[in-house]
Amino acid sequence: MGGSKPSPSPTVVYSPPPPPPAAPTPVPTQSLQTQVALNEVSGKQMRLNMELGAQLDRTNAEFFAGQDIRRGQAAGAEQRLTIGKTAEEERASRRLAGEEERKGIAATGVEYRAGLETAGTEERKTVQTTGAETRLTNLQQEMFRRYKEGRDYEQAQQQYRT
């Protein structure tokens, strides 16, 4: 590598800027008229849609009001049936409870009367036994009294003879 000279830097040449654009040229167009016509049609369509929507809302409100009334009526009827069924079941339950209570009272009465009868029978037996014992005791006392009188009489006769 010998002594060579460095090569010179390249030169950049700039091209001149483009000229400014000329004033726009008016071109007749129908887009404005088309847009205005479209806006008018769109407005009419929107009004028609709003009228139909309002009519549909009124129809729905009428229908659903009727539905709500029918739903309320159905709920009321169902509630009345439920209350009626509940009352019917409660009456049946009370009737059954009353019957069972009456049967219990009747059974208690039968048992009470049987107890009174048994007590009466036992009391009669007791009175009978007491009477028999009293009569036997009275008889024994009378016999003892007669025995003593007889003995006293014999003793008195014996002393008289002596």
Image: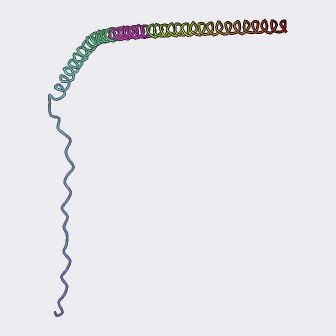
Q: Is residue 117 left or right of residue 56?
A: right
Q: Quadrant of the N terminus?
A: bottom left
Q: Residue at x 59, y 10 (%)?
A: 129
Region rendered in magenta: 76-100
Does the magenta-highlighted stretch encompass residue 141? no
Of residues 155 and 23, the one nearer the viewer is 155
Q: Give the vertical position of 14 relative to 147 (above or below).
A: below
Does the magenta-highlighted stretch encompass residue 95? yes
Q: Residue at x 64, y 9 (%)?
A: 136
Of residues 28 and 42, the one nearer the viewer is 42
Where in the figure is residue 59, as x and y percent of width and height?
A: 25, 11
Q: Give the vertical position of 21 relative to 130 (above or below).
A: below
Q: Is residue 99 left or right of residue 134?
A: left
Of residues 31 and 140, the one nearer the viewer is 140
Of residues 53 and 35, the one nearer the viewer is 53
Where in the figure is residue 63, as x and y percent of width and height?
A: 26, 11
Where in the figure is residue 51, as x and y percent of width and height?
A: 25, 14
Q: Quadrant of the C terminus?
A: top right
Q: How many marks?
A: 0
Where in the figure is residue 75, as x and y percent of width and height?
A: 33, 12
Magenta highlight: main SS: helix
Image-quadrant location for residue 83? top left
